[in-house]
Each structure stands twice: as structure tokens, then as C-alpha cells.
Amino acid sequence: MSGIRIVCDTNPLVYLLDGNRDIARFLDGQQIYLSVISELELFGKQNLSFQDNEIIESLLKGCFVIEINPEIKQIYRELKQKHNIKLPDAIVAATAIYLDMPLLTFDKGFKNISNLKLIMLDI
């Protein structure tokens, strides 16, 4: 799947940072986009060491972080009105829909969003 542009949910990145080689192989050669929400979630773990922060920063340098814009906000509102979805997940899904790219995730909660292209992973 080399060269494919994808939006990555936070959970595959967490597995990657924990050393999951399957995720590393899957993401190798991909153009990785992520919502600013995922960027913030990566730094949300308590007691991150200086080295942990450096590793996350290094990972993010290879990604395209997408800020929330008016179009993503509108898609978010539509998703929240139609689906029982948490705010961060709705923003991540809205980002993928806005970019018209598949969302890579382990989270089965995204399956109910019909206009969202998904790449579902399973451990």
C-alpha cells in the first residue's frame, strides 16, 4: 500500500510508538495525515519523559497535522447530530471526510458513519 494518503486515528500511532512492527510496516511509505486532536492526544499521556516527547515530536515531523477549519467544523456538527460519537472522534472523522481520505483506526465505533472511508485494523 505504498504511497497511499491516509488519515491516522490516534490509536494506531500509540501502537506504533509502543513498538508494534505490524503498524510500522503498514505505515511505511504512506503519507500520513492526522487531526490536530490526534496530535494533542499523543501528548496527553501523563508522566511523559523528555525522551517520550522527543519521539512523539519526531513522529509528527513525518505527518501532516490538519488544524480544525470551518469546513471540518460543519462536518463535525453534521456527524454529532446523526451519530452517538465522542467529540474527539467526531473531529477525527470530520477531518478524514473533509480530506476525502480513508481513516486508519482500531476503533469500531467509526463503522456507523456511512460517508467515512475506513481501514479497520485488528490486533
Image: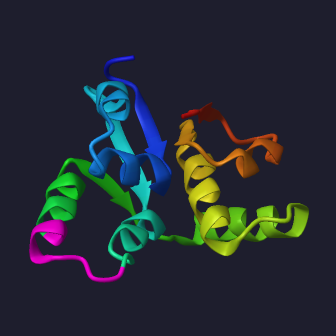
Q: Is residue 69 left or right of residue 41?
A: right
Q: Position of residue 60 (x, y in %)?
A: 24, 57
Q: Position of residue 24 (x, y in %)?
A: 29, 33
**Residue 57 at x, y percent in the picture:** 17, 64
Q: Nearer the viewer, residue 12 or 72?
A: 12
Which image quadrant is residue 52 in?
A: bottom left
Q: Is residue 64 left or right of residue 103?
A: left
Residue 94 relative to residue 49: left or right: right
Residue at image position (10%, 68%) is 51
Residue pictured at 37% horizontal, 34% vertical: 23
Identify the image quadrant of the N terminus: top left
18 vs 66, left or right, is left
Residue, x 57% and y 59% (percent of image)? 92
Q: Is residue 22 above or below residue 57?
A: above
> Is-magenta flag for residue 44?
no
The residue nearer to you, when weighing 74 against 105, is 105
Q: Which of the pair 34/73 is nearer the observer?
A: 34
Q: Where on the picture, by quarter, is residue 38? A: bottom left
- Quadrant in the rendering for residue 27: top left
Looking at the figure, which quarter contains the C terminus? Answer: top right
Q: Which residues are magenta?
A: 46-53
Q: Residue at x 35, y 82 (%)?
A: 46
